[in-house]
Amino acid sequence: MYIRCAYYGLQNHVKSRIISRNTKTPLYETLIRPVRTYEAETWVLSKQDEHRLSIFERKILRRIYSQVMDRGSWRIRTNQELYQLCGENDIVKFCHLTRLRWAGHVIRQDDNDLTRRVLLSKPGGKRPRGRHRLLWEDGVEEDVAKLGCRNWKIFVLNREGWRKLLKEAEAHPGL
């Protein structure tokens, strides 16, 4: 509900020809994207979720940056052009980075903190038949593996090293 309100409430501003692109881009980055990615650090993203997020973001960026005249005819900008013009990480990468940032925060908490205990606990019982449900920790493990970090739960305890790894992850193309 709120996601649609954030975008559709600002749709007239995003479509406006009077407002410049330099104004519309921060409008997206500060008002629409945060509402769309609220609590993204706790999400378990499937490929389909990532695809839907990317479609949503490109829809808005195409509204902001519109078409371009190329060799006498109008054409739609490519996805790569949109992300270069925007100058920000795509929304999926943003979600992965916030999840890694949150994982570091949770691991560094006290041993008796509830969120840390829930993260490190291993629930018992049988899992239902069929495909396993995606787990948050599995997503974090996958992201950390893409960055080439082993024993991330120990590495996180070095806060400066973890921050440096996250800065490098922003520039990492495979995340």
Image (cartoon, rainbow, N blue to C red):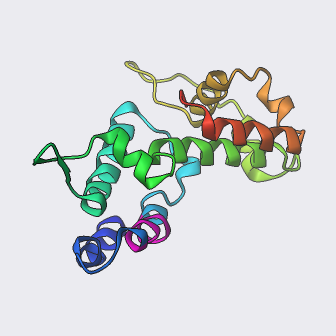
Q: Is residue 66 left or right of residue 57?
A: left
Instruction: Provide residue 148's location: percent of width, then percent of height.
Output: 70, 20
User: Considering depth in this image, is 103 or 16 the residue closer to the camera?
Assistant: 16
Residue at image position (42%, 60%) is 36
Give percent across and percent down for residue 149: 74, 23
Q: Name the quarter where the N terminus is drawn.
A: bottom left
* Quadrant where the C terminus is found in the figure: top right
Give the image quarter of residue 71.
Answer: top left
x, y (%) of residue 160?
Answer: 87, 44
Q: Give the residue furthest to the front.
A: 71
The answer to if 24 sits in the magenta stretch is yes
Picture quadrant where residue 54 is located: top left
**Numbered-mark total:** 0
The residue located at (23%, 58%) in the rendering is 66
Image quadrant where residue 145 sits: top right
Front residue of 144 and 127: 144
Q: Which residues fall within the magenta stretch?
A: 23-32
Residue 77 appears left or right of 92? left
Residue found farthest to the bottom = 18
Q: Is residue 49 visible?
A: no
- Of the pair 140 and 61, the residue shown nearer to us: 61
Q: Position of residue 125 (x, y in %)?
A: 58, 25
Going 53% across and 52% down the picture, which residue do you hit? 40
Magenta stretch, main secondary structure class: helix
Q: Is residue 89 visible?
A: yes
- Identify the residue shown where x is 46% and y is 29%: 133
* Vertical order, 124 against 118 (above or below): above
Q: Could you tell whether 130 is left or right of 158 in the image?
A: left
